[in-house]
Image (cartoon, helix red, strand yellow):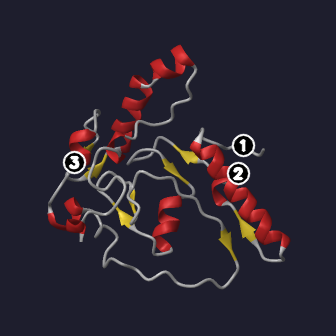
Amino acid sequence: MRWAHTRYYGEMFNDELRHEVERYVSERGAIAVDPATSPLSRTIRGIPGGPSSTWSERHALYAAGLGTFGLCGGFLTPAGKAMRCGSVVVNLPLPVSPRRHTSHTAACAYLDHGACGDCMRRCPAHAIGPAGHDKGACQQYQDMALRHLRESYGVPVTGCGLCQTGVPCESCLPDSSG
């Protein structure tokens, strides 16, 4: 398996699935690339706003019309935000997904009309506030709090995820979310 650029567990599957789609499309004569596992893909640290990636699955999904962004930075789809996503870029004519929302944050009840905000209360690092997600504070918390799991149990924990679970938009878009 091609897991040199992976994060862990669910992302291993995601990497392998994207690779298989890339292979399948390429074998049929089209051009396909899996940007997330490309050697050009990397995380950039030490910049204002916190760590950033050279490829964003969430932004690819937004460009494809599959959802919007939430206050915590998670991607909100009709299936909710507690999910994994992946993308393969191809040079094939594909049907257009109609946009369900009028802005890039319309599915978030807090950003759309000031309701909810449960992800702020769920964040143990207090890294989510009315202005959005502080990726630096989030990363500091993860480095400190999750170190025990990595060191004591060998669990390759890469994120907390509490802002994506136990909230109304975990597995759906609540009726009040626009």
Residue type, numbered disc 1: Trp
Asked whether the residues under the numbered discs 2 and 1 touch, taking CB atoms below 8 Å apart as contact, a structural biologist would say yes
For the point 41% across and 31% down, the residue is 142
Residue at (65%, 60%) from the top-left corner? 35
Q: Which of marks 2 and 1 is in front?
A: 2
Give the residue type at disc 2: Glu
Q: Using a 10 Å C-alpha cutoff, classify the residue at mark 2 as few (fewer than 14 neighbours), some (14 to 19) or many (20 or more).
A: some
Residue ID at (38%, 58%): 80
Quadrant location, the C terminus: bottom left
Q: Where residue 137 sits: x, y (%)?
A: 34, 36
Say if 168 sits above or below 155 in the image: below
Residue 41 seen: no
- Farthest top residue in view: 152
Q: Is residue 114 left or right of residue 102?
A: left
Q: Report which residue position mark 2 lands on.
A: 16
Quadrant in which residue 88 is drawn: bottom right
- In the rendered structure, the answer to whether residue 34 lies left or right of residue 157 reads right
Task: Give the residue type that dot 3 points to.
Answer: Asp
Q: Which residue lies furthest to the left in this view?
A: 114
Q: Is residue 117 above or below residue 4?
A: below
Q: How far apart are marks 3 and 1 (CA)?
A: 35 Å
Please give the residue where the numbered disc 1 appears in the rendered image.
Answer: 3
Residue 40 is situated, as x and y percent measured from the top left of the image, at 68, 54
Q: Distance between the residues labelled 3 and 2?
A: 33 Å
The answer to which of marks 3 and 1 sits earlier in the sequence is 1
